[in-house]
């Protein structure tokens, strides 16, 4: 059973068709009703009366006959023999034929209806039913059969309270929510019946009762002599069982898929979060590696300067600053001069830690000379070389430069 079949079967199981064949002397009048049950409420979907052929009936019911919808067939009029017997008569289905002596059970269908005061026993030849084109074609969908107008009794609990109900061709007398008797009477006016809150055509009353009996059952009716409807009922029950099992399997599958989806999205979120954390860690580690690399390079360069302590160049700068006079301003103080020769040769920076390059300016050359003499006397100075002094016309100051060699 496919998913589509499961969905269609659920709709079909909540739909019923009641068909009534009224056989006259020379004509057959057909009526039908299609009912649907939703949330415990039965509604009329479609109905029609005065159909004169089975082909017309099949055409009207076309879409419904393609589904597994249960059908109740009622036969009345010519061919149906009904006898009224006292209430104490046998009520069991297998004893119905005793009401009609000389009847061969294998050739007839018998029906018993427990009325308000009496029993109504009806009889129909099987060949009469088997010759019905609709029954021959759709017999496997027919789950129940009834004779006469007694199937109308399924409607009585839902009718307005009253002693009689008038149909176009009969008057039904009611007592104790059961049919008391049926009088044949042809009405010249159209009749309608109020069933609950639904107004239905009186000509479709029996067909409505037939369709409703599929949902409610017919405890007052007992049928004997036909087993084909048992097969249709068993087939429907088997499909219903398969439907329930398949629906349960689908619900379980949907539950598993839902749980799977929840776990998937949860894990996906965790993976995304972990991926983000790993990316951040990688960025952080990469940054740390870069910092370590830069620190190593700086350390390598710093170690190449040859200073025994980190504070040594600061100490040199402080010593030189303490000897300055107001006439002298320093513009550049390089403690550890780049080795230009090695830079050109090896393309690497090497610093001469024992050499300090000093540049500055002063308006008085004598002040510079005096300061140089003072620097040469510092205990850590080995000697001074490369002294230059020139006058800059733009700044109107004397520019000087010299190099100090440290001991």
Image (spheres, helix red, strand yellow):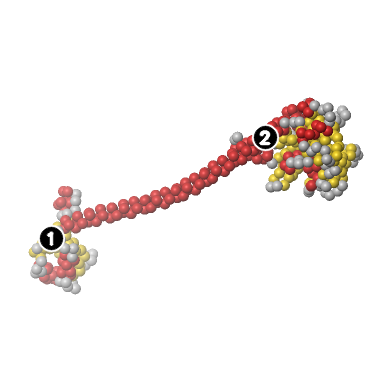
For residue 8, say whether it is visible. Answer: no
Q: Foreground: 146 or 306?
A: 146
Looking at the image, which residue is at 82% across and 44% down?
178
Q: Quadrant of residue 376?
A: bottom left
Q: Residue furthest bottom?
A: 326
Secondary structure type for disc 2: helix
Neighbor class of circle 2 (other Cα within 10 Å; few <14, some 14-19, many 20+) is few
Location of residue 251 in the rendering, given as x and y in whole percent from the top left corner: 57, 43
Whether residues under marks 2 and 1 lie with C-beta atoms below 8 angstroms apart, the answer is no
Q: Locate residue 244: give its quadrant.
A: top right
Image coordinates for residue 36, horizontal then vertical, percent: 72, 42
Q: Residue at x 89, y 38 (%)?
A: 184
State whether residue 111 appears in this view. yes
Q: Secondary structure at mark 1?
A: strand
What residue would you read off at disc 2? 234
Question: Which residue sits at x=73%, y=28%?
Answer: 137
Near mark 1 (Cα within 10 A), the count class, few <14, some 14-19 or many ≥20, is some
Asked if residue 138 is positioned above or below residue 44 in the image, the reply reads: above
Measured in 3D between alpha carbons, the distance from the residue under mark 2 to the one under mark 1, in whole angstroms, is 112 Å
- Frontmost residue, 320 versus 152: 152
**Residue under the point 44% across and 48% down:** 267
Q: Position of residue 142 (x, y in %)?
A: 73, 33
Callout in the foreground (2, 1): 2
Q: Residue 189: x percent and y percent?
A: 89, 41
Between 200 and 275, the one nearer to me in the picture: 200
- In the rendered image, the quadrant that contains the C terminus is bottom left
Q: Which mark is residue 311?
A: none
Q: Earlier along the polypeptide chain: callout 2 or callout 1?
A: 2
Residue designated by label 1: 354
Q: Is residue 128 above or below residue 250?
A: above
């Amino acid at each position: 059973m496919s998913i589509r079949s499961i969905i269609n079967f659920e709709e079909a199981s909540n739909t019923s068709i009641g068909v009534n064949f009224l056989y006259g002397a020379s004509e057959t009048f057909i009526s039908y009703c299609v009912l649907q049950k939703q949330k415990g409420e039965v509604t009329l979907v479609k109905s029609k009366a005065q159909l004169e052929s089975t082909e017309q009936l099949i055409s009207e019911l076309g879409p419904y006959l393609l589904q597994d919808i249960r059908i109740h067939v009622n036969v009345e009029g010519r061919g149906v023999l009904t006898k009224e017997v006292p209430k104490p008569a046998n009520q069991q289905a297998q004893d119905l034929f005793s009401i009609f002596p000389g009847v061969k059970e294998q050739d007839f269908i018998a029906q018993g209806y427990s009325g308000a005061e009496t029993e109504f026993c009806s009889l129909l030849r099987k060949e009469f039913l088997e010759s019905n084109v609709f029954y021959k074609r759709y017999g496997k969908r027919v789950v129940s059969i009834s004779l006469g107008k007694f199937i109308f009794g399924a409607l009585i609990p839902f009718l307005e309270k009253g002693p009689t109900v008038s149909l176009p061709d009969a008057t039904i007398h009611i007592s104790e929510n059961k049919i008391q008797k049926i009088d044949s009477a042809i009405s010249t006016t159209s009749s309608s019946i109020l069933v609950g809150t639904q107004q239905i055509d009186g000509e479709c009353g029996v067909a409505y009762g037939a369709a409703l009996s599929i949902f409610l059952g017919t405890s007052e009716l007992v049928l004997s002599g036909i087993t084909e409807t048992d097969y249709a009922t068993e087939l429907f029950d088997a499909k219903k069982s398969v439907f329930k099992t398949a629906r349960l399997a689908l619900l379980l599958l949907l539950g598993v898929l839902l749980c799977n989806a929840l776990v998937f999205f949860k894990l996906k979120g965790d993976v995304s979060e972990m991926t983000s954390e790993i990316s951040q860690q990688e960025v952080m580690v990469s940054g740390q590696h870069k910092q370590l690399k830069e620190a190593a390079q700086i350390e390598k360069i710093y170690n190449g300067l040859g200073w025994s302590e980190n504070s040594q160049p600061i100490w040199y700068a402080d010593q030189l600053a303490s000897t300055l006079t107001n006439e002298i301003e320093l513009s550049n103080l390089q403690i550890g001069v780049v080795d230009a020769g090695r830079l050109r040769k090896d393309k690497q920076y090497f610093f001469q830690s024992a050499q300090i390059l000093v540049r500055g300016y002063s308006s008085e050359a004598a002040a510079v000379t005096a300061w140089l003499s003072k620097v040469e006397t510092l205990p850590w100075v080995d000697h001074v070389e490369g002294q230059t002094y020139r006058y800059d016309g733009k700044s109107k100051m004397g520019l000087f430069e010299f190099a100090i060699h440290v001991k």
